[in-house]
Image: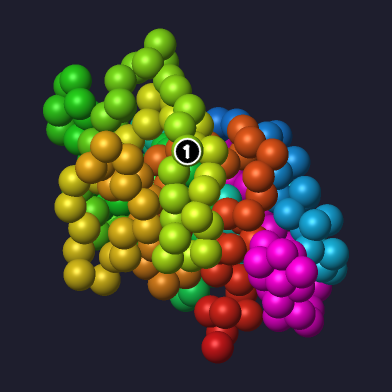
Amino acid sequence: LSIRRQRQMCIRDRFSMSLTFGVLSIQGDVLENILSVKAAIDALDIDATVTAVRTTDEISKVDGLVIPGGESTTIGQLSKFNGSLKILKEKIEEGMPVLGICAGMVLLSNNANDKVVGKIDQPLLNILDIKLERNSFGRQRESFESDISLDSIGIPKFNGVFIRAPSISDVGSDVEVLSKFNEKIIAVKKNNVIGVAFHPELTTDICLLYTSPSPRDVEE
């Protein structure tokens, strides 16, 4: 068996309960992430569903969450307005596994500046102790793809899609660096939380999703 197939089988064996995964649908590329999570569920052959979530009630019922790319300021402000920012923080601090993608990683941070305009007054979850810069690789027209590696979580090669991507210049002692590109930190992990600057949902490679922390991992 290939290493990837062995990892899939091992992860599938850890899921002994029915699970519900959510994609935060405040703003951003929600559909792409739902399809990506669905592909991971099918590949692992586990008893799970994925759904778009927005309200506090919907968020309270999920076992794991993807915070998608989009406009981090808009996601933060609307989440604060409808009360979901508070339940998000509570669920994450209680151990709910979360994957924050691009704007999602910005929302998870405790310190975000913009490359062009500097300090931004936006709601943040203050989960990841990181020094983050928005639009670190340029604006929309500077979007690019490049192979990256996340060796510490068993992914030696991954196609990174960078769209107005942030980067991280420094991390706290409780945050693990998973990947760098051109000496800039582009992926981090803290317990049940992974943040990435790129867009895994825009590739056909789902290994990052089934390598992310599972609810059972957190319970153990």
Q: Residue at x 22, y 29 (%)?
A: 114
Instruction: In this rendered view, identify the residue nearer to me: 102 or 82.
Output: 102
Residue 4 drawn above or below residue 36 = below
- Percent x, y of residue 48: 80, 64
Left or right of 171? Residue 11 is right
Q: Which residues are magenta?
A: 1-26
Q: Quadrant of residue 76?
A: top left
Q: Residue at x 17, y 21 (%)?
A: 117
Q: Amino acid at mark 1?
A: Asp
- Percent x, y of residue 18: 80, 73
Left or right of 145? Residue 186 is left
Mark 1 secondary-structure assignment: strand
From the image, tell me which residue sits under label 1. 147
Residue 21 drawn above or below residue 51 = below
Q: Residue furthest front?
A: 1
Left or right of 171? Residue 94 is right
Whether residue 28 appears in this view of the structure is yes
Q: Residue at x 15, y 33 (%)?
A: 119
Residue 10 sits inside the magenta stretch: yes
Q: Residue furthest top?
A: 141
Quarter of the image for the C terminus: give it: bottom right
- Percent x, y of residue 56: 58, 55
Residue 202 drawn above or below residue 92 = above
Q: Quadrant of residue 135?
A: top left
Q: Residue furthest left?
A: 118
Q: Residue furthest bottom?
A: 220
Within-10-Å neighbours for mark 1: few <14, some 14–19, many 20+:
few
Residue 220 sits inside the magenta stretch: no
Quarter of the image for the N terminus: give it: bottom right
Q: Residue at x 23, y 42 (%)?
A: 183
- Percent x, y of residue 131: 19, 48
